[in-house]
Image (cartoon, coloured by chain):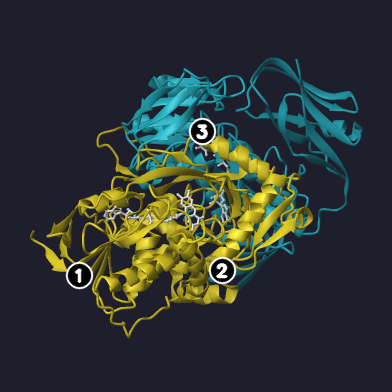
Chain colours: A cyan, B yellow
Amino acid sequence: MHEEIFDVVIIGGGPAGLAAAVSASDNGAARVLVIERDRELGGILQQCIHNGFGLHRFKEELTGPGYALRYIKMVEARSNITVMLDTMVLAVAADKTIVAVNSRDGMIKITAKAVIFTMGCRERTRGAIRIPGSRPAGVFTAGAAQRMVNMEGYLPGKKVVILGSGDIGLIMARRMSLEGTRVEAVLEIMAYSNGLTRNVVQCLEDYNIPLYLSHTILAVHGNGRVTGVTCAKVDAAMRPIAGTEFYLECDCLLLSVGLIPENELSRELGIEMDGRTSGPVVDQLRQTGLPGFFAAGNVVHVHDLVDFVSEEGEIAGKYAAWHANGKMGDCGCLITVKAANGVRTAVPQVIRAVSGNTEPVRLYMRVEKPEKNVTLAILSDGQVLLERKLRVAKPGEMIVVDLPVENIKKIGDDITVVLKH
Amino acid sequence: MENSWKADVVIIGGGIVGAAIARELGKYKLDTVLLERYPDLAMGTTKANSAILHAGFDAPEGSLKALLNVRGNELYRQLKHELGLELDLTGSLVVATNNEEMDVLAELKVRGQKNGVEGLKIIGREEALTREPNLSAEVVGALYAPTGGIMWPFGAALAFAENAVQNGVEVRINCPVTKIEVIEGKVTGVYTPDGFIAAKYIINAAGIEADNVSRLAGDDSFTIKPRKGEYILFDKAVGNLVKTIVFPTPSKVSKGILVAPTVHGNVFIGPNATDSDDKGDLATTGRGLAEIVARAQKLVPNIPLTSSITQFAGLRAAADCGDFVIRASNLTKGLVHAAGIQSPGLTAAPAIGEMVVGILGELGLELKPNTNFNPVNPPKLVFSQLDDEAKMTAIKENPLYGRIICRCETVTEGEIVAAIHSLCGARTVDGVKRRTRAGMGRCQGGFCGPRVTAILARELNIPITAVIKDTADSQLFFNKIPGSCEVTGDA
Ligand SMILES: Cc1cc2nc3c(=O)[nH]c(=O)nc-3n(C[C@H](O)[C@H](O)[C@H](O)COP(=O)(O)OP(=O)(O)OC[C@H]3O[C@@H](n4cnc5c(N)ncnc54)[C@H](O)[C@@H]3O)c2cc1C
Ligand SMILES: Cc1cc2nc3c(=O)[nH]c(=O)nc-3n(C[C@H](O)[C@H](O)[C@H](O)COP(=O)(O)OP(=O)(O)OC[C@H]3O[C@@H](n4cnc5c(N)ncnc54)[C@H](O)[C@@H]3O)c2cc1C
C-alpha cells in the first residue's frame, strides 16, 4: 500500500476544504493534504455558474467557479499544500489513518496529526420523501441536473416541473429557462419558499414561472419517460386536500427537497451528531467530539452563502494546525448551545473556554419558520446575554451573531438561543 | 422474411424462469434461443418482488407450488456455489400475535412437514424476541423455518443466463416475439423484429404476458391477472432492524406484509396485494405505501421511515387456476407453458427448469447430454469485498478499479466496464445498477448517474443522448437547444 504522512489532512476540496488548507498552512501546519474525489477542486461551486458568490468575502459578485478559482490560486501559492484529485477517501480510523483510493497510486494509507472533514452534502432523493407513482426516466435531483447542464452540456428534459423551492431549485428554474426549456411550475410543500428572497425574485418572478406554495406532488406518471405529475394543495399538517388535485404535463421532474450533510465517514468513527443539522456536533474551533477531528462547511450544517463556508473552513484549518503542532493547550469547560423556541439549529453546538482566546464566538442559526419583528435572544441561567431585533427571519437565511468573549465568561453551564415575539 | 434461421428450442421470456430453463437446456446438445423483449434480462416480475427463498410451507400439499418450492430451495444451495449467487439462509419467522394465529402456525407446520420442509419449529415469545428484538411486544410465538432465505433475484436470473450462454445457448435482448407460426396444430417458429426463428419447441415463460403469448399460438386455456405488490426499501444504516425474514401469520389470500433484510444489507417492507387490469401498471400509490407501513408497524413497530431510499412495485402473474401452469399445451403441439409463476417462483425457478426439460423429453425432443457442460460461472470482481492487498493488485492490473464511481456502494469504473462487456452485458443505466449496485445506495444515483451514463456511452460507442434508463423509450438526457442563451462562467 502506498503510504504518506501529513500534519493536516482535509477530506473534500470544496470551498470549506480549500479555505481550511490555506488557513492550516498559514497557521503553521508543515504538511497539508487536500483529498478530492472529483477531477478538479472547487466542490459544488464548479457547477454553480451563476453569479452571487463572494459578496461578503471579496465584496464582488463572482460566479461559483470564479470564487473557487480565488481559493485554488491561494492553495497553489502555498508549496506545503499537496492536492490529490480523483481520489476517494474510503475510511478514516480513530488513530487518524486514512484509507483512500485512486487509479494512480492504488490504495493509499495516510497518517495525519489532524483531520478536517469538508465533504459537503448530498441531495435528498425521491425515494427519501416517497413520491408515489411510476419510475420513468426524467426524475433527477436538481443538483445532479445542474451538473449535467452546466458541466457536461446536456439537458435533463424539455418541459420541467420543479418540486422544492430551495436555492438549487430556484437557480435551476432560471437555468432551464435560459436553456430554452419550459419550466411549468415550482411547487413547494411549505407555505413559504426555503430559498433566498433574491433567488425567488431573480429566478422565478423575472421569468414568469409560477410558484405554488403549500403544494406537493402526489404521483409521477409515465413509463419510459416522465409524461406528467399529479399535484395537490396541502393543509396545515401538509396532508393533500382532496379535490385540489391537478395534472401538469412535463417530461422532467427536478427535486430540490433538501440537502443532507455527507457524514458517513464521521459516523463510522462514532463522532457525536446533531440530529437537527445532521452534522457533527462541533465547538467554536470546529473541533468535533473526537480530539483532532475537525469539520467545516456543508458537512456541519447546510449553508446558503459560500462566504460563511470559507469562514468555517478557515477556523477549522487554523485549529487543526494548532492541534497538529501541539498548541491547543488546555481547553476549559464546555458550554452547550441549545436552540429552542423557534430557533431550529445553532452552530457551534459547544463553546469551549479557551485560555488566552479573545475572539468572539460567531453563532450561526436558522429559525423554524418565517417570522416578522421578533427578537433573537441568547440566554444563560435566565439572564439575557445578547439580544438582536430581526425585522424578518426566514428558515432559508442563516442568522449570524457574534457573541463577545466577555459575555461568554459570564455564563454558566449552557446557553439557549430563542426567538421572542 | 429477409432473415430467418433455425433452432431446436425457443424460450420466450428472459425472467428468472426463462433463464433457469435456458440454463437447464444448456446441459444438452441443442440449439436453444432465449428471447427477451426488453433491453435487459429480468426487467419484469423478477426485478421487483420479496426476494425470499421460501422454505415451502405455504402452498397446499400436492400443488406444483409446494413441490417445486421445496425442490428449488434445495437446488439453490448448490447453485449458490456453482453460479456465485448472492443468497443467504437467514431463516424465516412467521409471527403470531394471538392464540388463533398460533393455531394457524400449527397448521402451517404440519403442511410444511407434508411438503417436505425440514427443521420447522414453533418457538415461544421469548425465543422470538431473542432472535428479533425489534418485534412487536404483542408477539406470542412464531414458526421458525431454518431453510428460509434471502437472495438477489436479478443476480440469479443473470447468472442462469450467463451460464446458459457459456454452454452454448443464445440470448437475445430487444427481441419481442410478435407472432407464433402454427401449422396443422403444431408450432413451427416465432416472428421477431430480428427475423423468423423456425423451431418445433417453444417455451412460454413470458411472465405476466404468458396468456397473450399462449394466444399467439392459438391456446386460450388460461388467463393471467396482474396483482400488484408495493414495497419500501430502507438504507443500510438501518439494515440491522431484522436479521431473519419476518412474516405475519398469513390470511386466506396472502402471505401478508413482511419485514425482511436483503442480501445487500438493506431492509424492506411489503408487499400489499391489489388486483389490477393493467399489465403495464407498476406505479406505487400513496394509499398502498401507507397500507404497508401501517401493517409492517404491527410486526416491527419502529420502522425507520426517515431512512427510506426507494419504493417500487411488482406484478404477480396470477393464473386463473391459482397454481403454476407448467405443462405442454393441450391445444398446440410443441408449445410448453411455464406460466402463472407467482410466488414462490424465484425459489422454484431451477426446479421449473428441470420439470420443463422433462416435459420436452416426453414430447419427443432428443436430449443428448452436452459433454462440455460447465456448471460454474467465473467469479466476478467486487471491489468493495476485496481486502486491501487484493484491491491494490486489481488496480495495478487495471487502473479503472482505482476510480470510485458510486460513492454510496463503493463501485469502481472497472466493475462497471466489466458489467458492460461481460456475457449478457449491461446496455442501460439500470442494467449497470442491477449488476454492480452503482446507483442503488442512499443517493439513488444522484452522484453516479451522470457518470454511469458517460461510461455507457463511451463503452457502447453511442452518444450520451442515446443512453437509456431501462426501456427503449427511457432516454435520460437531451442535447442543448441551439440558439438558447448561453451563459458561461466568467472565472
Ligand atoms: C446549487 C447551489 C447554488 C448555490 N448558490 C450559492 C450562491 O448563489 N451564493 C453563495 O454564496 N452560495 C451558494 N451556494 C452555497 C455554497 O456554494 C455551498 O454551501 C458550498 O459550496 C459548500 O461548500 P463545502 O466545501 O462545504 O461543500 P462542497 O462544495 O460540496 O465540497 C465538498 C467536496 O468534498 C468532496 N468529497 C466528499 N466526500 C469525499 C470523499 N469521501 N473523498 C474525497 N472527496 C470527497 C466532494 O467531491 C466535494 O468536492 C449554493 C449551493 C448550491 C448547491
Ligand atoms: C409482489 C411479489 C412478491 C414476490 N415474492 C417472491 C418471493 O419472495 N419468493 C419467490 O420465490 N417468489 C416471489 N415472487 C414470485 C417471483 O417474483 C416470480 O415468480 C418470478 O419472478 C417470475 O419469473 P418469470 O420469469 O416467470 O417472469 P418475469 O420475470 O416477468 O419474466 C417474463 C419475461 O418475459 C418477457 N416477455 C413477455 N412477453 C414477451 C414476448 N412477447 N417476447 C419476448 N419476451 C417477452 C418479459 O419482458 C419478462 O422479462 C413474488 C412476486 C411478486 C409480484
Label 2: how many Cα within 10 Å (few below 14, some 14–19, many 20+)? few
Q: Which residue is mark 2?
A: B385
* Discs 1, 2: same chain: yes
Pick the quarter of the image with the C terminus of chain B.
top left
Q: CA distance from mark 3 to mark 2?
A: 37 Å
| Residue depicted at x 23% and y 50% | B215
> Left of A64 or right of it: where is A421?
right
Residue A236 showing in the rendered view: yes
In the image, are marks 3 and 2 on the same chain? Answer: yes
Q: Quadrant of ligand 1?
A: top right
Q: Tell me which corner region of the image, top left, top right, bottom left or bottom right, holds residue A89.
A: bottom right
Report the chain holding disc 1: B
Residue located beneath label 3 in the image = B286
Viewer-nearest residue: A9 or A248: A248
Label 2 beta carbon less than 8 Å to ligand 1:
no
- Give the chain letter at badge 2: B
Q: Whole-Å distance between the Cαs marked 1 and 2?
A: 41 Å
Q: Position of residue A281 (x, y in %)?
A: 74, 44
Ranked by sequence position, the earlier of labels 1 and 2 is 1
